Image: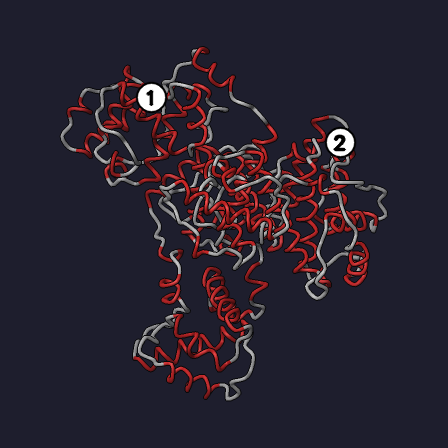
Amino acid sequence: MSGYVGILVSDPWLQNQFTQVELRSLKSHFVSMKRESGKLTLGDLPAKMSRLKVVGSENLTDQDRASFIQDLHPNLDEDVDFEFFLRVYLKLQAHATATTGSGGKNNSSSAFLKAATTTLLHTISESEKASYVAHINNYLGQDDFLKKYLPIDPSTNDLFEIVKDGVLLCKLINVAVPGTIDERAINTKRVLNPWERNENHTLCLNSAKAVGCTVVNIGTQDFIEGRRHLVLGVISQIIKIQLLADLNLKKTPQLVELVDDSKDVEELMSLPPEKILLRWMNFQLKKAGYKKIVTNFSSDVKDAEAYAHLLNVLAPEHSNPSALAAKNPLERAKLVLEHADRMGCKRYLTAKDIVEGSPNLNLAFVAHIFQHRNGLSTQTKQISFLENLADDTQISREERAFRFWMNSLGNSTYINNVFEDLRNGWALLESLDKISPGIVNWKIANKPPIKMPFRKVENCNQVVKIGKQLKFSLVNIAGNDIVQGNKKLILAYLWQLMRYNILQLLKNLRFHSHGKEITDADILEWANTKVSSTRSHSRMNSFKDKSLSDGTFFLELLSAVQPRVVNWSLVTKGVTDDEKKMNATYIISIARKLGCSIFLLPEDITEVNQKMILTLTASIMYWFLKQPVEDRPSGISDSEGSSQLETISNSTTDDSASESSMEEHGNL
């Protein structure tokens, strides 16, 4: 969502009247109002604005609003654009406050937003802030660039100042998922100009989405302004991803000790990391003879008894009998933390955090314990279960890409595993509705939790029906295939959904006045034309062209759409595998830095995964066509690009060259 507000509101005065989140919420309501009747006039506003709960206007009638608006603007047939709407909103707010005697300072539209969104209700937990600061100091304290700012004092708000240049968050993402961001793409001058700072935040947000963070209601300006609850929300997600990174069978095959047979292994693999951590904790507590089952990281651990038993099992040499004998939970929690200290675990929470049941901090505590000492067997006979499980790297990579893409849509359901979490059809219906609003018949949809299997089939049947309506290739696919978790069919559906999404975005952006469909061939031809406009001889023959593996073509394409984004002194010749990977990592990072929300991995470029190559090319095209014509580099003019694409838009393309993978949604 980089630059989102700049696109919404060009008037600096209006920008200063609202926060980023407020503008986005108001924009959403404005679009809904306009969609109801196809247009929005001044005469429509009194009734429609009554739903907004404008500050102080609870006692105003529709007639009061209408009279006030008509006094301001007698022509009630006049069309209302978004900025006009905001001005009327602010004037009505001031009028309502004065009329009802609410008094007080005009605090923009915060009261409305408290009713309309939960974002502004978030409070800052000083304990969580202190924990995250300790984590940052521990993992980034020796970073060459950041060490002049670290350690951060948790008792101050220095954290929110340091994040304003975007470097710290980019580095933190790389700690959580090493190699996500090519640090050559981070702007690390001592003093950054606003453009460079914005690039860092754009890179951070797109990279955060690419590792599984949900950042739907966050824009670059929120970081630049140091909006504390949003900054902490992103940091919390990044740290959580890092702490739970080992809770899967690929990283920790010893986890098979938690199950009895291969069928249970498959079930274990489908669980989200938090559930695996709980299962591990209960597995160890059972050894200790602890009778209760821990089902959460809040109320079930507040008395610290489970922790005392857990640490006694994992590190009996450091145990203190007083911990179990203690009558006071706070005293027991203190003894537990002393035990953890003797084990060498970093302390990121206090005894008070334990007894207050802070879910984020308790989760972090248990995850740290697991990372430091998991107490699982390394016997190879138990790991033999894993040999029977298919290890399809390609399927695994595509599942990851689709999962993060779907989570970036902002659905109510967070996807941990597409093969499991899509089986009831609900998340797919939500995604379809986001991509093509109104296409889902919610009257016949079944909302989770769904106990009856046939209800899941009903949802999935609608998913397949809509897919056919969108002209997806769904030969011999039925709703029950999704319910059964058929991996290849689910991936095939998701790829077509993602591809449909980007083609529609491009069509709406570039061809809304022509009504022409966009094809893969259009995207291919656009990319080749852009590169040739720079007098380069590089060419992409198809999305599976093996010459693309060295990255040169995409570096030239990125340079063509924004000449200053590629630092050619950092580019390798792309001859060896290592050089190819370095180029691929750089390509992904600078594309995200521009504003492309992409979910592929460097291997997708070096191995020329045709589906991922299509999504990369399309996302660069989408970003370029969104730019104002006057901001584009010299090359193809807008009209030339239009005629070029119109010429080829009737051509066909080999869909087998792109029949099963991914692209992004509206943020592309």
| Residue 621 picture location, percent across and down | 70, 51
| Residue 46 picture location, percent across and down | 43, 79
Left of 443 or right of it: where is 471? right
Looking at the rendered structure, the kind of residue marked 2 is: Gly
Left of 613 or right of it: where is 470? left
Q: Is residue 258 visible?
A: yes
Q: Nearer the viewer, residue 140 or 403?
A: 403
Task: Check if mark 2's residue and mark 1's residue have beta carbons within 8 Å.
Answer: no
Left of 276 or right of it: where is 488? right
Vertical position of residue 428 compared to residue 41: above or below: above
Residue at the location (51% across, 54% down)?
Answer: 433
Looking at the rendered structure, the kind of residue marked 1 is: Met
Vertical position of residue 113 compared to residue 264: above or below: below
Q: Look at mark 1 in the image and give the residue it sits on.
A: 343
Q: Look at mark 2 in the image and give the residue it sits on.
A: 574
Residue at the location (32% across, 19% down)?
Answer: 314
